[in-house]
Amino acid sequence: MLKGKNWARFLYLGWGVIGIVIDTVSTPSISYVIPQILIYIMICINLLTPKATGYFLARSNKLSEEIL
C-alpha cells in the first residue's frame, strides 16, 4: 500500500471485513469488537477519500508508464 498499489488498498478493505466477521463470531461479547469496528471504519473512510484515490491511481499510472 505504501508503494501506491491500488489492489493493496482493496485487499486491506476486504481482509478487514473478513477479520471483523471472524472476531464477531469467535468473541464472547460484541463489546470487544466495537473498538475494532470503529477503527476499521475510520481507516476505510481515509482510504476511500478522493485524495487517497488520486494518490493510488496516480502511482499505478506512473508505474504502468515506466513499464511501457
Image (tube, rainbow, N blue to C red):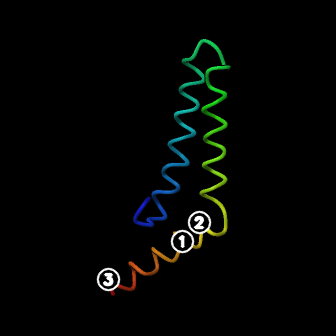
Give the Cα separation between the discs numbered 1 and 3: 19 Å
Q: Return the disc, 2 or 3, that comes first in the chain's sequence.
A: 2
Q: Position of residue 3 (x, y in %)?
A: 40, 65
Which marked residue is nearer to the observer: mark 2 or mark 3?
Answer: 2
Q: Position of residue 31 (x, y in %)?
A: 67, 19
Q: Return the disc, 1 or 3, that comes first in the chain's sequence.
A: 1
- Circle 1 residue: 55
Kind of residue indicated by mark 3: Ile
Kind of residue indicated by mark 1: Tyr
Circle 3: is it few (<14), some (14-19), or many (20+) Cα within 10 Å?
few
Contact between labelled residues 2 and 1, with CB atoms less than 8 Å apart: yes
Determine the residue positioned at 49% across, 64% down.
6
Determine the residue positioned at 62% across, 50% down.
44
> Is residue 12 positioned above or below 23 on the image?
below
Give the Cα separation between the discs numbered 1 and 2: 5 Å
Circle 2: is it few (<14), some (14-19), or many (20+) Cα within 10 Å?
some
Q: Which mark is residue 35?
A: none
> Is residue 9 positioned above or below 54 on the image?
above
